[in-house]
Amino acid sequence: MSSFFRWLRSNSEHYLLVDAHRRLATRQGTPAPRAPRGAKEIFWLKVFAPIYALLPWPVRHKIMKAMPGSHRKTWEPPPPLRGPAV
């Protein structure tokens, strides 16, 4: 996986998780994570996360499938059966 896609995936996972914590804290009436500081955090939490949340699942799924990464791995087929297990 290229370093760009690794960076993109790492950042998006982190900031989507922070946003989910913020939404959950708001719903539960508990303290939320600190407010975003700096241009990087503001972009990810105020621009990326809300846009991502608005995208319908089929669009998100197509984007994820188009990017290289572990989410594209498939399960290995089961080994052939060779008689009774016991």
Image (cartoon, grey):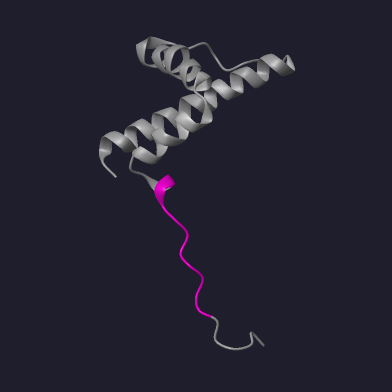
Q: For this view, does 66 lie left or right of residue 52?
A: left
**What x and y, as percent, mark residue 16?**
50, 26
- Between 19 and 31, the one lying in front of the other is 19
> Total label count?
0
Please give the name of the residue rendered at 64% of the width and 87% of the height, measured from the top-left corner: 84
Residue 30 visible to the viewer: no
Q: Vertically, is 84 above or below 53?
A: below
In the displayed image of the protein, which residue is found farthest to the front? 58
**What x and y, as percent, mark residue 64?**
41, 37
Q: Vertically, is 84 above or below 57?
A: below
Q: Quadrant of the C terminus?
A: bottom right
**What x and y, as percent, mark residue 30?**
71, 16
Please give the name of the residue rendered at 46% of the width and 17% of the height, measured from the top-left corner: 51
Please give the name of the residue rendered at 46% of the width and 35% of the height, measured from the top-left corner: 61
Q: Quadrant of residue 83?
A: bottom right
- Between 59 and 30, the one lying in front of the other is 59
Residue 4 visible to the viewer: yes
Majority secondary structure in the magenta region:
loop
Q: Vertically, is 11 above or below 82?
A: above
In the displayed image of the protein, which residue is found farthest to the right? 28
Read off the magenta span: 71-80
Please give the name of the residue rendered at 43% of the width and 28% of the height, measured from the top-left corner: 12
- Between 82 and 19, the one lying in front of the other is 82
Q: Quadrant of the N terminus?
A: top left
| Residue 77 on the magenta segment | yes
| Residue 84 on the magenta segment | no
